[in-house]
Image (cartoon, grey):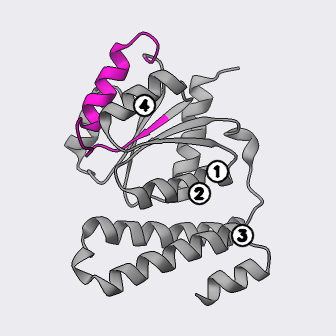
Amino acid sequence: HALTGNAGIAGLFLIAQMADAFEALLKELHEKPKNINASTLRTVANAVDFLGFLFEHGISSNKQEVSPANILVVDDEPRMVNLMRMNLELEGCRVISASNGREALEKARQDMPDVVLLDWMLPLMSGIEVCRQLRRLPETRRLPIVMLTARGEEGDKLRGLDAGADDYVTKPFSPSELIARLRAVLRRSRPE
């Protein structure tokens, strides 16, 4: 709570916003300990990593390499989407989100993002199936796809890459590593 207030007073609005969201998450977990599971613990770890990233980099980040990328974030956990949104918007990206596989296919065709960050375990259709379908469609065949998932076994990574993903990042992830991987994928997809 003190971090939120002090960051706001100091004009560090991204840190204040993130600290406020993190405080709400911790309060909810404290009041409802039944909600503590592997997924919420990964979210807590990602929030701490992102706060560290904000303290290290502040508002001076190299936006030119990724900007003005439109990124479709596909994840059914709203807190994860918000965490990625804050990371990516800090880099100057525009974020579109989808919470299930069918919505992801629709938004990929409708909004034509520059990159898709795709979770594996989604309602209605798995991320692997979304990836396969995006590769079959002429308009999205060359769309860069980065799998961003808790499934970190070697076999899972191979399945993701074989389905057509251009890269594979496991949760919990480092925000700076994710940004670096996105820059690399964008450089390969935009050679000019």
Secondary structure of residue under mark 2: helix
- Within the magenta stretch, is there residue 125? yes
Mark 1 residue crowding within 10 angstroms, few (<14) / some (14–19) / many (20+) = some
Q: Residue at x 62, y 70 (%)?
A: 17
**Relative image position of residue 155 (x, y in whole percent):** 20, 41
Label 1 SS: helix
- Residue at the disc numbered 3: 13
List x then y, in percent, for residue 43: 39, 66
Q: Nearer the viewer, mark 3 or mark 4?
A: 3
Q: What number is the disc on residue 89? A: 1
- Are the residues tagged 2 and 1 within 8 Å (C-beta)? yes
- Mark found first going from the N terminus, 3 or 1: 3
Give the total of numbered labels. Answer: 4
In the rendered view, tell whether residue 89 sits above or below residue 165.
Answer: below
Comes first in the chain, label 3 or label 4: 3
Range of the magenta residues?
A: 116-140
Q: Quadrant of residue 107?
A: top left
Residue at left offset 52%, top offset 33%: 115
Residue under pointer 4: 166
Mark 2 — residue? 86
- The answer to whether the residue labelled 4 contacts the one labelled 2, judged by CB atoms less than 8 Å apart, is no
**Direction from residue 13 to residue 33 in the image, left or right:** left
Give amino acid for label 3: Phe
**In the image, what residue type sits under mark 4?**
Asp
Q: Is residue 38 above or below residue 94?
A: below
Q: CA distance from mark 3 to mark 1?
A: 13 Å
Q: Are marks 3 and 4 in contact (CB under 8 Å)?
A: no
Residue 111 image-quadrant placement: top right
Q: Earlier in the sequence, mark 3 or mark 2?
A: 3
